[in-house]
């Protein structure tokens, strides 16, 4: 896997994941919607850690500087 995510993209995804986690654990979002957002937040963190977004690959999108 070649990296296709830049620093700004990773930071934005991690911030969104943190916000979703805070909203879920404070009870502002709950139920099925909360679980779905939590899973999406986990995917955001995972893709940020590996610097690769599988949805970018088919479209040829790269936000990293190379």
Image (cartoon, rainbow, N blue to C red):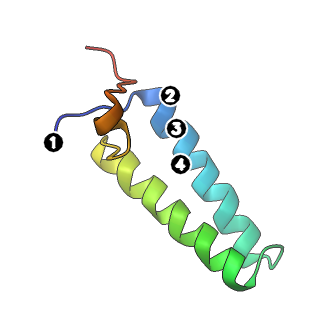
The residue wearing badge 2 is 8
Looking at the image, which residue is at 47% across and 54% down?
Answer: 44
60 shown above or below 55: above
Determine the residue located farthest toward the bottom in the rendered image. 31
Circle 1 residue: 1
Q: Residue at x 24, y 34 (%)?
A: 3
Q: Please tell me how crowded label 3 is: few (under 14), some (14-19), or many (20+) other residues with Cα within 10 Å.
A: few
Task: Return the x and y of residue 55 as percentages of the image width and height.
Answer: 38, 44
Q: Which residue is mark 4?
A: 14
Compared with residue 46, is residue 15 higher up or lower down, i.e. above or below? Answer: above
Q: Residue sitting at 67 percent across and 62 percent down?
A: 20
**Badge 3 is on which residue?**
11
As measured in the structure, the alpha-carbon distance from the residue carrying label 4 to the one carrying label 1 is: 20 Å
Choose the circle earlier in sequence order: 3 or 1: 1
- Binning the other alpha carbons within 10 Å of mark 1 as few (below 14), some (14 to 19) or many (20 upward) gives few
Q: Residue furthest top?
A: 66
Question: Mark 4–mark 2 contact, CB under 8 Å?
Answer: no
Q: In terms of secondary structure, where does tag 4 sit?
A: helix
| Label 3 close to label 2 by CB (< 8 Å) | yes
Residue occupying image coordinates x 35% and y 32%? 59
Q: Nearer the viewer, mark 3 or mark 1?
A: 1
User: What is the x, y in percent for residue 43?
Assistant: 44, 60
The relative height of residue 5 versus residue 31 in the rendered view (above or below) is above
Q: What is the residue that sits farthest to the left in this orientation?
A: 1
């Amino acid at each position: 896997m070649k990296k296709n995510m830049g620093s700004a993209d990773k930071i934005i995804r991690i911030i969104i994941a943190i916000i979703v986690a805070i909203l879920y654990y404070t009870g502002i979002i709950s139920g099925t919607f909360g679980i779905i957002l939590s899973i999406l937040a986990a995917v955001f963190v995972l893709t940020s850690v590996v610097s690769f977004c599988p949805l970018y690959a088919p479209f040829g999108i790269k936000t990293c500087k190379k």
